[in-house]
Image (cartoon, rainbow, N blue to C red):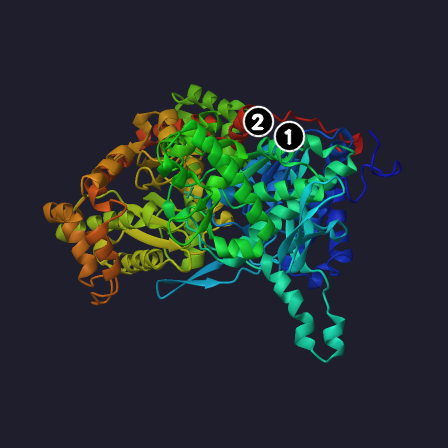
Amino acid sequence: MVSILPNNIQIEDDRTGINIETLKRAFLDNLFYIQAKFPKISTKNDYYMALAYTVRDRLLNRWLNTTETYLEKAPRTVAYLSAEFLLGPHLGNNLINLGLYNVVKQAMEDLGLSLTDLLEQEEEPGLGNGGLGRLAACYIDSLATLEIPAIGYGIRYEYGIFDQEIKDGWQVEITDKWLRYGNPWEVARPEAELEVKFGGHTEDFIDEHGRYRVKWIPFKVVKGVPYDTPILGFQTNTANTLRLWKAEATESFDFEAFNKGDYFGAVHEKSESENITKVLYPNDESYEGKQLRLEQQFFFVSCSLQDMIRMMQVQNLTLERFHEHYAIQLNDTHPTIAVAELMRLLLDEHGFDWDKAWNITTKTFAYTNHTLLPEALERWSLNMFGSLFPRHLKIIYEINSRFLDEVRIKFPDDFDRLRRMSIIDESGERYVRMANLACVGSFAINGVAELHSELLKKTTLHDFYEMYPEKFTNVTNGVTPRRFMVLSNPRLANLITSKIGDSWVKNLDDLRKLENFLYDTNFRKEFHKVKQEVKQDLANYIQTSYNITIDPNSLFDIQAKRIHEYKRQHLNALHIITLYNRIKANPNLDVTPRTFLFGGKAAPGYYMAKLIIKLINSIADVVNTDPDMRDRLKVVFLTDYNVKFAQRVYPAADLSEQISTAGKEASGTGNMKFSMNGALTIGTLDGANIEIREAVGEENFFLFGLTAQEVSQKKAAGYNPWDYYNSNPELKLAIDRISSGFFSHGDPNLFKPLVDSLLYRDDYLLLADYQSYIECQDRVSQAYRDREKWVWMSILNVARMGKFSSDRSISDYLKNIWKVPSVKVDVPEYSQSND
Ligand code: PLP
C-alpha cells in the first residue's frame, strides 16, 4: 500500500509520536497554534481542545489508511442509517482504543494538569434520546473493533437532546449548545456536499427509448454538507467514518433580494434551509407527525444514498451491484423513506427499470424494529407526505399496489388483511405507514431481544410474519465494554485484568474465567472494595454537586433511563413511600439503609412523565428532611442524565431497576451496563432482562411481576386497579399519601392526574405488580445484609455478561443479515512505535 504521509516524517513527529515527551510537546504546540493560547492565559477548555487535537492527530493515520484501503479494495460495506447517535464524549474512548490512556495521563500530570478534569470538560454530542441512539453508538464502536468496513450515517443536529435542569422539583429544558466551543473531532467536507430536493410536482414523459419516465420538479433544494468523525476500533487499525449531514442553503445569500433592500428576505432561505438540522426531536418512544421531522429524515437519507452511489462511481463499480456493495441497516423506521428514495434514484436518475430497481432495493435494506408501543409507530399524513415528496408518494403507491397483489395471491379474499397490511392507512385520514414500508422493502426484519422478536411476530408485525416468515430474525442488543467498563470503571477493569488478563475487553465471554476466583476470599474482598470505592466517588460527586450526603455503605438502588410511564419510575416511588410509611409506623424498624438514585429526562411535551419527576423530587424533600429517615433512606434525583453521567452511575450501583411492564420494553441496554458493572437486577420478564437472567442465573437476579402473557390476559379480562387498591392496605396507604397532598405541601391537586391515571386506568399495571415488587424488594433488603453472598452474586453478574457485548450483536448481524467480511487495514510502522 502507498503510504499517505511523506517518507521523511519521523516517529517522533508531533502529530504521530506517542512517547510522553512528544505528547507534551504536541499538546503545547496545539495549544499555541490551534487555540492561540499559552498556559498562563489558557482556560480548561483550551487545554481540553489542545489535548483533543493531539489525540485526533494520532487517529488520523489509522483513519486515512482505513479510508484508502476501502477505496482501493472496494469491500462490501455496512451502512448504518440512524437518525440518532448518542455518542458520549470522544476523548476518553479514543484514548482507551488507542491504548494511550496512561501515557497521556502522565503527560498531563507532568504539565500540572489532570486528565480527569480535561475529560470532564468535553461537551458530549447528545445526538440521540436514549437507548436507540446509544445502541447506534455502541454498534459503530464494535464494527470498527471487528474490522468491518462500515459507515454510520446520521444528522448533525446543531442542538442535541436538551440539557435538563430541575427548578422547584420540575424539569426545565435548556437548549444543548454542544457546538458552542467547536468540535475538535469532526472534519467538515464542504467539497462533498450534495443537493436534496423537497416539494414541487412531478412530470411524466417518454424518454428517447420510448419508456415511461417521471421527472421531479422540486419546490426547493437544500444542500447537505457532510461532517466526518473517525470511529476507531479497540486495539485495531480500523477507524471507520461517522458521516453526519448538516443542512445549508444552496445560495447562502440572495443577492437579488439584497439589492432590492430586502435584507431579511435575503437571509430567509438560508435560515429556512438550516432549520432542517437545527434540533433533535426530544421524544423517546413516541412520535409526532411534524413536517420538520419528516424533512430531517428524508434529508439525511437522501444525502446518504447519493453519497453511497457517488462512492461506487468513484470506485468504478456498476450500480447494478449496489446491493452487493452495501448492506444498509435501517435503525427503526426513521430512515425508512430510503426504500422509496433508492427506488427514485435508480429509476429516475440512473435509468433502471422498475423490476431491476426493486430487486436491488429489496436486497439492500434490513430493518430493525425498536418498539411495540403503538404510539411510537411512525405514520405520516398522506397530504403532508405527498406535498413534500410527490415523486416518492407515487413510488410508494406503485410498491403498495404490487405488494397487495402478492398478498391477494397468498391470502385470497382476505380483505381485512389487505387493509391492515397496506402501506397506506385508509381507515380515516390517510397516512403512510413507515413500518409497513420497511417490512415490504427489506430483506430482513429484526427485533432487539428474544421476547421482543417473538412479540413482533405474534402481534405488531404478525401479518408480515405470515407473509414473509423468512425475513424475521432476532438480534439481541449489546453494549460496548470499552466505554462502559474499561473507561467508566477502571478500578473494576484493572481488577479483572489482574486476574484473567485483558482478552475480555475484545472477547467478553472471557469474563467467565472470573468464576475460577469465586472461592478466593481475597478476590471477593478486592471486588467489594472496588464497588465501595466507586460508590464513594459517586457520593463525593453528589456531595459537591447537590450538597447532599449519601452513605456509601447503604444500598445504592438506581433507576436511570428516560422517564416514561411504561418504565414505571412511579412504581419505584411507591416502594419508597411504602418504606417511609413503615418507618413512620414503627420508628425502630430494622431496615436496610438505602439510597435511591434516579436519573432521566422526560419528553418536554409529556406531562405525566414530568409529573413523575416532580413526584420523585417531592418525595426526596420529605424523606431527606425527616429525622426518622436519617441513615436509612435517602432519595436523590440526578439532573441531566446523559452518557457522561451514565458512565459515572452504572459502576456505582448495587441494584439496577429494570421494572417496565412486561411486553413494553423492547430490549433495554442500561440493564446490561448495570449488570456488567456488578449491579444485581430487580426486574420483570421484559426485553433483554429475560436473557440477562438466563445468563447470570435465576438465583442471581431479583424477579417479580406479571409476564407479558399475563399482562395481556389481565387486560383482556377487564383489569380493575381499584381491586388492588381496596385489598392492599400498604398500597392504599402509599397512594393516599400522594393524593392527600402529603408530598405537595397539602395540595391534593398537584399529583391528582397521576393518582387518577393509576386508579382509573393504570395502563402499565403498577397496582397489579405492586405486591410482587414490594416482596421482591424485601428480599433484596434481606440479601444485602449478607454482604458475602451479595458480592458472590455480583461477581457472577459480571462474569456471565459475555453475551451482552455489542461485539456479539454485530457478529449476529454479520452472520445472519449483512454477510460483510472483515478487512485488515495496514498502517505503516512509524505510528505503531511507542518511543
Ligand atoms: N439514556 C442514556 C444517557 C443512556 O446512556 C442509556 C443507555 O443505554 C439509555 C438512556 C437507555 O437506558 P435503558 O436501556 O435503561 O432505557
Task: Name the amino acid type tagged 2.
Answer: Leu
Q: Which mark is residue 251?
A: none
Task: Out of 410 and 446, give the one closest to the viewer.
Answer: 410
Residue found at the very far right of the displayed protein: 8
> Could you tell me which quadrant the C terminus lies in?
top right
Query: Which residue lies under the disc numbered 2?
Result: 814
Q: Is residue 680 left or right of residue 284?
A: left
Left or right: 18 as drawn, with respect to 558: right
Whether tag 2 and tag 1 are in contact, CB under 8 A, the answer is yes
Q: Residues within 10 Å of mark 2 (few under 14, many from 20)?
A: some
Sequence-earlier tag: 2 or 1:
1
The one of 751 and 30 positioned closer to us in this rendering: 751
Q: Secondary structure at mark 1?
A: loop
Q: How many marks?
A: 2
Percent x, y for residue 830?
Answer: 80, 33
**Viewer-proximal residue among 151 and 655:** 151
| Image quadrant where residue 323 sits | top right
Mark 2–mark 1 Cα distance, whole angstroms, equals 9 Å
User: Residue 58: x and y, percent?
Assistant: 73, 41
Rendering quadrant holding ligand 1: top left
Towards the viewer: 111 or 604: 604
- Disc 1: which residue: 148
Q: Position of residue 513 (x, y in %)?
A: 47, 21
Q: Secondary structure at mark 2?
A: helix
- Looking at the picture, does residue 558 appear above or below residue 357? below
For mark 1, does the 10 Å Cα neighbourhood hold few (<14), some (14 to 19), or many (20 or more) residues?
many
Locate residue 118, reporting x and y percent: 61, 52
Residue at x-position 20% and y-position 65%: 748
Q: Is mark 1 within 8 Å of ligand 1?
A: no
Q: Quick check: 748 above or below 668?
A: below
